[in-house]
Image (tube, helix red, strand yellow):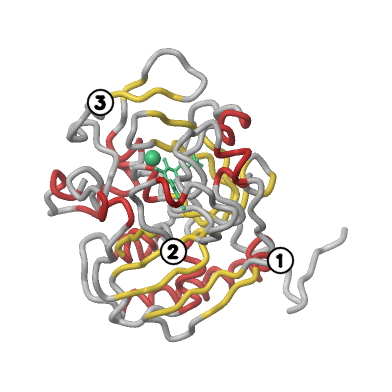
Amino acid sequence: MKIHRSFSGLPDHQVTDEKIFRQRRNLVLAMGLSPLMPGLSSAATRCDESLDLGRIETPTRRYLVSHYNNYFEFSTNKEAVALLADKMSVRPWTLEIKGEVERPVRWDLEDLVSHPSRVERSYRFRCVEGWSMVVPWQGIPLCALLSAAKPTSRARFVRFRSYVDPEAMVGMQRTGLEFPYTEGLRIDEAMHPLTLLATGLYGEPLPASNGAPLRLVVPWKYGYKSAKAIVSIELIERQPETSWHRVSPDEYGFYANVDPEQPHPRWSQRRELRLGETRKRRTLPFNGYADWVADLYRGQDLARLS
Ligand SMILES: Nc1nc2c(c(=O)[nH]1)N[C@H]1C(S)=C(S)[C@@H](COP(=O)(O)O)O[C@H]1N2
Ligand SMILES: [Mo]
């Protein structure tokens, strides 16, 4: 029988164990230095655990996932995005992780795509507008990259910036949004094991319309938090301003956790239309991920946080 050995000469399972151990230690070190915040300890202990998400609904057809998109850099017409976004060049691509970190890093896309922590995750995805989908993503848990950069004790929030290419992105002038598209998370949300930096879907590289080559996926929050085409991740002390919050602060909050009981000022959030279906479904608290993330918000006023 052939035993696979890695370069370290250890059988693969030991290497894995050691890798997990190192990740955990780095994470605990990183998190241990951070100011105490609700949910922090649970996020710290679960970052690198494998997640049993149970059974999830049937994935949305791939064609629908990549041909009905919000990507305002290109167009506000969801059906037009796929054609327009295809014209943007995504190679070469680097992602920088900077700010309040001991080890700023730049990743080439190639190294992310072959990253040892890559996972496959099917997640529900719920847009604030009331449509939803189920997507089989491939990607890297963001915590694996953040812990490698070693956040300092001042890192309490994370800011994500999308790419700008004024020539290819022909919709930029026609929206009220300011670009680069900017989003943010609290550090414990960013370190949560569900938070993914997606590099692909349906086993293939990300379609341009879904945010190629690299996009954030935060499945318990409304879709606008999941910024596309990410080039920069910055750890910072204060809650960052975000693109949607800036144009419409009463409608698009920073936390934006999916909450059927908290209506948007202009419509109810109780139900949603899954792409490809004809009858609406009930929207679930935290988009169905309450068991994994509700702890992050213990003791906080969720009405104000949504
Ligand atoms: N850079 C960028 N990221 C973005 C957006 C955008 O316009 N630009 N739209 C957001 C919104 S509102 C949603 S619902 C999701 C849509 O992702 P999808 O097109 O992959 O379904 O992307 C989010 N990320
Ligand atoms: Mo959205």
Give how far apart the Cα atoms at labels 3 and 2 are.
30 Å
Q: Residues within 10 Å of mark 1 (few under 14, many from 20)?
A: some
User: Mark 3 sits on what residue?
Assistant: 270
Give how far apart the Cα atoms at labels 1 and 3 are.
47 Å
Q: Position of residue 277 (x, y in %)?
A: 48, 17
| Quadrant where ligand 2 appears | top left
Tell which circle, 1 or 3, labels the residue nearer the N-terminal end: 1
User: Mark 2 sits on what residue?
Assistant: 161
User: Mark 1 sits on what residue?
Assistant: 12
Front: mark 3 or 2: 2
Front: mark 1 or 2: 2
Report whether the residue tagged 3 is closer than 8 Å to ligand 2.
no
Q: Residues within 10 Å of mark 2 (few under 14, many from 20)?
A: many
Q: Position of residue 290 (x, y in %)?
A: 30, 42
Tell which circle, 1 or 2, labels the residue nearer the N-terminal end: 1
**Looking at numbered disc 1 in the image, what kind of residue is underneath it?**
Asp
Give how far apart the Cα atoms at labels 1 and 2 are.
36 Å
Front: mark 1 or 3: 3
